[in-house]
Structures are given as C-alpha cells and as structure tokens.
Image (cartoon, grey):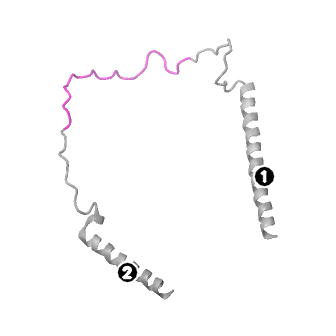
Amino acid sequence: MVVFFSAIGILLWIAFLIAVLVLSGIIWAAGNLILWVLDLKPLPNQRSGRQKPPVAPAVGPRRNVPPAPAARSVPRVPAPVAPPTQAGPDIWPKWTPSHRLYKARELSLWQEQFDALDSRG
C-alpha cells in the first residue's frame, strides 16, 4: 500500500514538472511572438527585403580625443626561459618510505581483523 502511494506521488511530481515546462515554453514563445510583432527584435532567420535605416554615430567627426601615440619600433626581446625546477619530496607524499610503512601496517591490521572474522565461522 505504501509503495502504491509512493508511486502516485512520484507520478504527480513528474506531471507537475512537465506542466511547468510546458507553461514556461508557452510563455517564452508568446514573449518572442510579441517582440517580433512589435518589431523590437528581428528573428534570426528573417529574410525580408525591408531594411532598417542605419543608426547615426553618437560621436561626430570632430572629437576631443587626443590622437594615439605613434608606435615606436622597439625590437621585441623574448622572455627568458626559466630552467625546470626539481620537484620536492612533499609533492608526492604517497611515495615516501614512511607512507609505505604506514600503509603496510594498516594492511596487516585489516588482514588480521579479516582472519579473525573468518576463523569465527
């Protein structure tokens, strides 16, 4: 009986999510249709002969901007290449002898516990 109610709950949740997906798709399509009808946003595949007039530039031909400085012809020097550095022993702690010894002790402890469980049966 509990499984039946759980299955109904899951199916209702899935139906709710599908309904939300469909409603959001309808709202998205309606919004795009309204924007297209109002000619606020052209569709990407629109190929009509009507063209919008070009927008006038916001800045006139006489600007109060100083001209860019002339480029100097300075030869580029390549950056020095740093020699490869040696990796310290702290980068790979698993490979140190103390870590190997720790792992060996841990493995022997687990093996002893497993053997003790096996010998009880």
Find residue 95 and report its image quarter. Answer: bottom left
Please identify the residue farthest to the bottom as the structure is shown: 120
| SS of the residue under disc 1 | helix
Find residue 48 and report its image quarter. Answer: top right
* Residue drawn at x 19%, y 47% as measured from the top left: 84
Horizontal placement of 40 versus 11: left or right?
A: left
Query: Residue 20 location in percent, x, y?
Result: 75, 48
Residue wearing tag 2: 109
For the stretch drawn in magenta, what is the main secondary structure?
A: loop
Q: Write the start and end of the magenta stretch as one range.
A: 56-79
Q: Is residue 20 above or below residue 66?
A: below
Q: Quadrant of the N terminus?
A: bottom right
Foreground: disc 1 or disc 2: 2
In space, the residues marked 1 and 2 are separated at their CA atoms by 53 Å
* Residue 74 covered by magenta stretch: yes
Residue wearing tag 1: 15
